[in-house]
Image: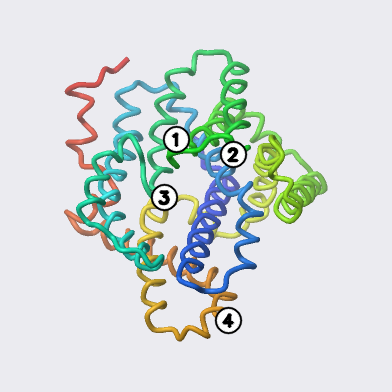
């Protein structure tokens, strides 16, 4: 069994922390908290956040391209399908709090009806889980094609989608944006790892500075409106994220978080919505703007800690543990109907 690579785990930890911070900022803003500065930060850092996460996921996916379809289903795809279905129901009810924060009235029957369409039109932040299942399947289907063809076609698709030329469901648009980075993690794994381990600190720092200038210019000067600019930011952002991950690899916290991203991703938005909804009911209106300056990172830390704590507690219960893992009978469905080619 190959040892885990510390900076890859820290990179995943960094990416999931940035995702939670983004959602914390977003929902605090919906509740009226003054988060303008954090909005700017989140928009600027976006070109690291998901590109890095999907690239790291691709680095871990290489072995599954050589595995059988049965093993891929048992270990990966069945998990994503199961938790997507379970949390689509949970998120539907917690999203009602989000609608309340937006001053809208929720329709439970209408929301439940939308669950039936979720496998085709993923909703909420769960599109990420849906996309991972899709990415594993599609990547395996096309893995015998020449790497330049895979990267070229997916790169053009990403270029167009990241230029905001696609409008539609978050899952489909997000998949178009980030499949290129997932494939890059798979197909360029050896090159990425070799560069990350051999690049001198001065090179890593230079890459981060270049990305910073591109990202700030994109946000502050509106350069993101130019087709291809944001795609370039995201590509450079992956390497900037790797540079930061190399530094964070020395710290246990990010590495630990990077090995437990699934429960955090599934749970954090529900926790954020509950906390923000409660705060909006008890915090006086004049204090919202002041608290918005400090709350996003605090709420993100609380959501991460609570997500990890909840998943550990659920893991000890024979029924609740299936909020985060697929039942054996579901994973073994491959034995009854999925080929083992």
Q: Is residue 294 visible?
A: yes
Earlier in the chain: of badge 2 and badge 3, it is 3
Packing grade of label 4 (10 A; few <14, some 14-19, many >=20) is: few
Q: Nearer the viewer, mark 1 or mark 3?
A: 1
Height in image: 119 above or below 255?
above
User: How far apart are labels 1 and 4 at the CA level?
Assistant: 37 Å
Q: Going 56% across and 78% down the picture, which residue do you hit?
A: 289
User: How far apart are labels 2 and 3 at the CA level?
Assistant: 19 Å
Q: Are marks 4 and 3 in contact (CB under 8 Å)?
A: no
Packing grade of label 2 (10 A; few <14, some 14-19, many >=20) is: some
Earlier in the chain: of badge 4 and badge 3, it is 3
Earlier in the chain: of badge 2 and badge 1, it is 2
Name the residue beneath numbered marker 1.
172
Label placed on residue 307: none
Label placed on residue 290: 4
Label placed on residue 164: 2
Would you identify the image quadrant in which residue 337 lies?
top left
User: How far apart are labels 4 and 3 at the CA level?
Assistant: 28 Å
Circle 3 — which element?
helix
Earlier in the chain: of badge 4 and badge 2, it is 2
Height in image: 263 above or below 195?
below
Q: Position of residue 300 (x, y in %)?
A: 49, 66
Name the residue beneath numbered marker 3.
125
Residue 221 in the figure: left or right of residue 175: right
Earlier in the chain: of badge 1 and badge 3, it is 3
Q: Quadrant of the C terminus?
A: top left
Circle 4 — which element?
helix
């Amino acid at each position: 069994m190959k040892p885990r690579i510390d900076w890859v785990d820290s990179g995943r930890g960094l990416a999931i922390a940035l995702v939670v911070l983004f959602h914390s900022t977003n929902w605090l803003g919906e509740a009226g908290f003054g988060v303008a500065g954090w909005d700017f930060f989140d928009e600027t850092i976006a070109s690291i956040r998901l590109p890095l996460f999907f690239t790291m996921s691709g680095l871990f996916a290489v072995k599954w391209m050589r595995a059988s379809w049965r093993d891929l289903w048992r270990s990966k795809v069945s998990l994503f399908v199961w938790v997507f279905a379970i949390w689509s129901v949970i998120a539907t009810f917690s999203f009602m709090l989000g609608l309340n924060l937006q001053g809208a009235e929720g329709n439970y029957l209408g929301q439940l009806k939308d669950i039936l369409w979720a496998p085709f039109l993923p909703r909420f932040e769960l599109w990420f889980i849906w996309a991972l299942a899709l990415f594993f399947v599609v990547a395996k289907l096309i893995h015998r094609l020449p790497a330049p063809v895979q990267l070229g076609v997916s790169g053009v698709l990403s270029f167009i989608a990241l230029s905001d030329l696609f409008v539609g469901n978050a899952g489909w648009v997000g998949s178009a944006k980030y499949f290129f980075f997932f494939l890059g993690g798979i197909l360029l794994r050896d090159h990425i790892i070799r560069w990350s381990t051999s690049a001198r600190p001065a090179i890593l720092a230079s890459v981060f500075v270049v990305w910073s200038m591109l990202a700030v210019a994109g946000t502050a000067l509106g350069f993101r409106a130019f087709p291809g600019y944001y795609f370039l930011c995201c590509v450079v952002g992956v390497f900037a994220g790797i540079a930061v991950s190399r530094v964070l690899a020395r710290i246990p916290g990010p590495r630990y978080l990077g090995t437990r991203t699934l429960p955090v991703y599934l749970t954090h938005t529900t926790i954020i919505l509950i906390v923000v909804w409660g705060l909006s009911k008890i915090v006086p209106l004049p204090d919202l703007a002041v608290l918005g300056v400090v709350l996003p990172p605090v709420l993100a830390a609380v959501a991460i800690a609570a997500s990890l704590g909840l998943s550990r507690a659920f893991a000890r219960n024979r029924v609740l543990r299936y909020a985060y893992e697929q039942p054996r009978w579901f994973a073994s469905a491959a034995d009854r109907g999925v080929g083992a080619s």
